[in-house]
Every structure is written in structure tokens, then in C-alpha cells.
Amino acid sequence: MTKVGNVSSLFYTPPSGRTSSTTLRFDKKGIVEDKHYDTKLERSVLIASLESYDLVRNHGIDVEYGVLGENLLINYNPYHLEAGTRLNIGNVTLEISQHCTLCKSLTKVDSMLPKLLKDDRGIFAKVIKPGHISEGDDIYILE
């Protein structure tokens, strides 16, 4: 295992709307209590890097963390990781499944966001080993 960073913030979307949390619970169907739970298992978890927010802010767009739709905001840039790469975070194991596709809903925040974040919005992962992830948890790439 190679330590690469840690979790900065956590988010999920219950019926009441987008919410930040200090801990999220995961099972094989995704993030428990999230609106996307048990829908598309390959896209259960969206991971974004703080670097995405730096990129946006460097272009004069001021946004709050969580606006990109991520579940895990981390201080490591994972966008180069290939599908099949496994991450251990907290006591959860996630497997990278695909890069995030552009979401037209980002234009509601700013019309430049989809083009600006074309390759830097995030990556999707599926849950391999259930458990909990908390803010501050270390991130390890499993070899």
C-alpha cells in the first residue's frame, strides 16, 4: 500500500438535498442514505480533487466545496488512475470504474464549468469492501 493523501470533505445527497458529513457509511450498493444508492453500482462514489476547485477558482469562479457533486473531496489528484485501481480509505476499499462524464447541470453554477473541468471533474468508483470513511482518513493505493 502506498499512502497518497487524505479525505478533506465528504458529501451525500439524501431526499432533503445536498449535505456535508464528517462520516459516510458504504455497503456494496453505494453510500447508504444517498439518492444514488443501489442505482448504478459502477458510479456509486464520485471522488474529486481539491485541484479541481483550485482550477475553477484560478479562472475567477468562486464555488463552495461539494458543488461538483463529489462524495469524497480529497487532497490528491486521482484523475490519472486507471479503471481497476483500488483505494483503501478508512476501512473501505473502492475500485476506480471510470472517469466522470461532464454534467450539464454544472452550467447552472457557471457556464464555463463543463468546458473548464472536462478532464478534471472527478472519477467514479464502486464499493468493494463496505465500511465507513471519515474526514481526515488516509488514502492508500493498493498494489
Image (cartoon, rainbow, N blue to C red):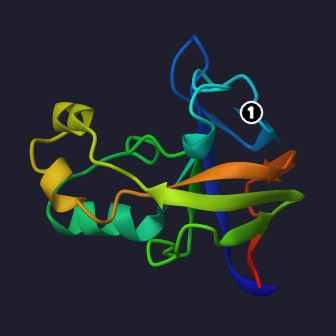
**Measured from the top left, where is residue 131 in percent x and y?**
89, 46
Task: Give left or right: position of 36 versus 136.
Answer: left
**Measured from the top left, where is residue 70 in percent x and y?**
50, 46
What crowding class fits label 1: few (fewer than 14 Cα within 10 Å), some (14-19), or many (20 or more)?
A: some
Determine which quarter of the picture holds residue 60. Answer: bottom left
Please identify the residue farthest to the top as the structure is shown: 15
Task: Give left or right: position of 53 versus 104.
Answer: right
Number of callouts in the render? 1
Could you say which is closer to the camera, residue 50 or residue 35?
35
Could you say which is closer to the camera, residue 42 or residue 139?
42
Task: Give left or right: position of 107 versus 34.
Answer: left
The residue at which mark 1 appears reads as 29
**SS assignment at label 1:** loop
Residue type at tag 1: Lys
Above or below for 89 versus 19: below
Quarter of the figure with the C terminus: bottom right
Q: Residue at x 80, y 39 (%)?
A: 28
Q: Residue at x 76, y 28 (%)?
A: 32
Quarter of the figure with the N terminus: bottom right
